[in-house]
Every structure is written in C-alpha cells, then in structure tokens.
Image (cartoon, rainbow, N blue to C red):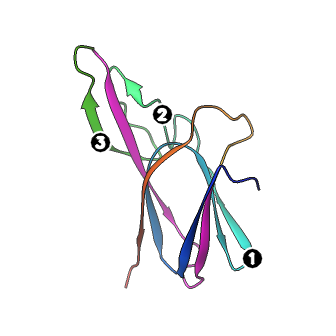
C-alpha cells in the first residue's frame, strides 16, 4: 500500500473512528495487519463545492459555508467506521488513493471513540 499520507500515532485502541473528510481512501494499520476502509464517491464523500449541500447514504453533512457572492457552498462530510478489532492497538493510519486516483484527498480531522 503506497500511502498518500501516513499518520504515525502513539499506539491506542478504539471502537470507532469518526473522520471529517472531503475525499480519500484510507487504510488503518495495526500490529502488522491492515484493515481497509473503502471510501466511495457519492456514497461516503461528494464534491466539496455544491449549489445545494446533498445528503449522501454513507456519511453525514458535518459543515457547510456559503461562498460569498456565489450560489455555491463549501461542504465537508463526516463518516464513522466501526473497528472490527477494537482490542488491537493502532500503529498508524494511511490515506491512500483509490485505483482511479480521482479527486484530491483531504482529511480534516479524526476522532477515535471508545464504547466503554
């Protein structure tokens, strides 16, 4: 996996990752194993500049802001990924282009949450 960006972390475990993103495909590495989190256009992400911010099935609208003097708004989506192995510590998070290398990957924030 060729990472577009790698975030090295202090090892931690979590139940869910909540990401605020514009466009990316990501993989989560832990203890030598990789969990791939596919991100699909128009399901988990959409265009960051829209006339009317659109709801999409795999994410929530997290933020919008009108572009002054235009009929367009900036939009960012938030998506939650539930970790199938929450007891395993995460070593790094990689942002990786999909096969078609469409768009420009952008990650605005990551929040790790635990159920306990």
Mark identifier at residue 32: 1
Q: Dot 1, how many residues are within 10 Å of its Cα: few (below 14), some (14-19), or many (20+)?
A: few
Residue at disc 3, secondary structure: strand
Q: How many neighbours does mark 2 have within 10 angstroms: few (below 14), some (14-19), or many (20 or more)?
A: many
Query: Which quarter of the picture shows residue 74?
Result: top left
* Residue 9 x %, y %: 54, 73
Q: Are marks 3 and 2 in contact (CB under 8 Å)?
A: no
Residue extent of the magenta highlight = 71-94
- Please provide percent x and percent y for residue 116: 37, 85
Mark closer to the chain start, 1 or 3: 1
Tell me if residue 52 can be seen: no
Residue 97 in magenta stretch: no
Q: Is residue 13 left or right of residue 50?
A: right
Q: Give me the C-alpha separation between circle 2 and circle 1.
A: 32 Å
Q: Position of residue 64 (x, y in %)?
A: 28, 36
Q: Nearer the viewer, residue 102 or 16?
A: 102
Query: Observer-nearest residue: 92 or 76?
Result: 92
Location of mark 3 (residue): 63
* Chief secondary structure of the magenta portion: strand
């Amino acid at each position: 996996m060729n990472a577009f960006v790698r975030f090295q972390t202090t090892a931690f475990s979590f139940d869910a990752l909540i990401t605020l993103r514009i466009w990316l495909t990501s993989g989560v590495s832990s203890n030598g194993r990789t969990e791939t989190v596919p991100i699909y256009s128009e399901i988990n992400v959409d265009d960051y500049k829209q006339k009317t911010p659109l709801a999409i099935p795999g994410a929530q609208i997290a933020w919008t802001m009108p572009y002054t003097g235009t009929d367009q708004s900036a939009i960012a989506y938030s998506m939650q990924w539930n970790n199938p192995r929450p007891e395993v510590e995460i070593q790094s998070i990689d942002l990786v282009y999909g096969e078609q290398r469409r768009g420009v990957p952008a990650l605005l924030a990551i929040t790790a949450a635990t159920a306990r």
